[in-house]
Image: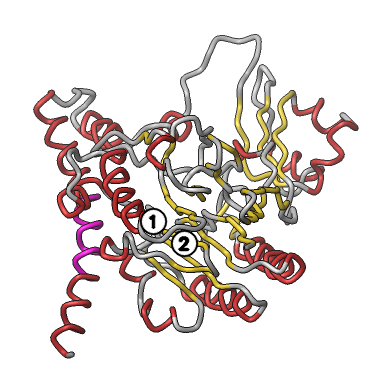
Amino acid sequence: MRLIHTSDWHLGRSFHRVGLLDAQAAFVDHLVEVVRAERVDAVLVSGDVYDRALPAPETVALLSEAVTRLIDAGAQVVLSSGNHDSAIRLGFAAELLERAGLHIRTGLSSIGRPVMVGDVAVHPLPYLEPSVAADRLGAGERTHAAVLGAAMERVRADLAGRGGRSVVMAHAFVTGGATSESERDISVGGVSAVHPSTFDGVDYVALGHLHGRQQVDDGQRYSGSPVPLSFSEVNHTKGSWLVELDPAGVEVSAVEAPVHKPLAVLRGTLEELLADPRHAGAEKAWCQVTLTDSVRPLGAMDRLRERFPDTLVLQFDPQGVRELPTPYAAAVRQRDDLDLCCDFLAHVRGGNPPTEAERTLLGSAVEGSRRDRARHDDEGQTDARDARSGAA
């Protein structure tokens, strides 16, 4: 049985205001060819199919085209929701689509019910927001580890009476994984890290959320995003995993994706960068440039784009002079939502930071916003199921 493990498509994402839809469409073309050439039985997409809860029409059209072509090429397609997806929107018409070979799992009620690919039981676990999922799954704590542990109890209960090979799809931060700048933090509201032992007892764990392709433990891998989503991924090799399961064991091999547009991170003085022949490869790349001139050159971006036309980010780090204050955009880049709210409150009050009580109140508001969105999606699915049951 052959599976392709991929994740974090983030359809509709922009790269420093440059749309990625063409690059994502090229990846779909590649994936269809791999399915045909390798006779793949199923394509697994472990969350963050879309980049936002309300995807644009052209983004939805690309996903529709992708799943249709993959199924026509001979593979079933299994999608699970990630923290960027709206569970109820992604899960629309899931029961009907399953008849055509498209299996979409976004709700708690589907946990423990596998997608059978031949004799391999594939258990897709949607992203589980602890504050919403903990009570319904009977988890002891409101943490990612606890809710995934409770979900895995349902998975193991199914596997105990089934036998055969098994695969779990999960969207989470598993201990040992290397992060990049483009992932959205999922730690607010509970401990985010999940130990690899949480998934003990299955043959392969197809992970999503981290954007670098990597192995974190025996049989547990992240496929990473198929296209770069930040300049921190300049050294990533993008692609997916080809997973072959047979009675003898599990064999995993890397499948590299086509490079739609390379990335380049350049650093030096303006004159050095414009003259150095070693940077010839960057002339056709998306570039992030840091200038080290002691005095900021006039017209720096225009001059850079004469040689590097796709320069998207220009930063300054003057050398040989006193350190300048960090630009606001750079200062907030690594700040979480709560810190940004506190910074804003301090700014409008003339520099007076929030008290501990005010910080606690802001933290509750930030967490409440996340929780309400997750609960809305899950309740929407529950209402839809109840309506169908009543109609029957």
Q: What stretch is highlighted in magenta?
A: 370-380
Q: How far apart are marks 1 and 2 (CA)?
A: 8 Å
Quarter of the picture holding the C terminus: bottom left
Query: Are the two marked residues, 1 and 2, in contact with CB atoms closer than 8 angstroms?
Result: yes
Q: Residues within 10 Å of mark 2 (few under 14, many from 20)?
A: many
Residue type, numbered disc 2: Ala
Quarter of the picture holding the N terminus: bottom right
Kindly report the secondary structure that dominates the magenta region of the rendered protein: helix
Q: Which of 62 and 218 is in front in this view?
A: 218
Q: Residue at x 19, y 36 (%)?
A: 363
Q: Position of residue 113 (x, y in %)?
A: 35, 65
Q: How crowded is mark 1: few (under 14 residues within 10 Å), some or many (20 or more)?
A: many
Q: Residue at x 65, y 9 (%)?
A: 320
Q: Which of 233 and 257 is in front in this view?
A: 257
Residue hosting label 1 = 159
**Would you say 90 lies left or right of 357 here?**
right
Checking the image for residue 121, the label placed there is 2
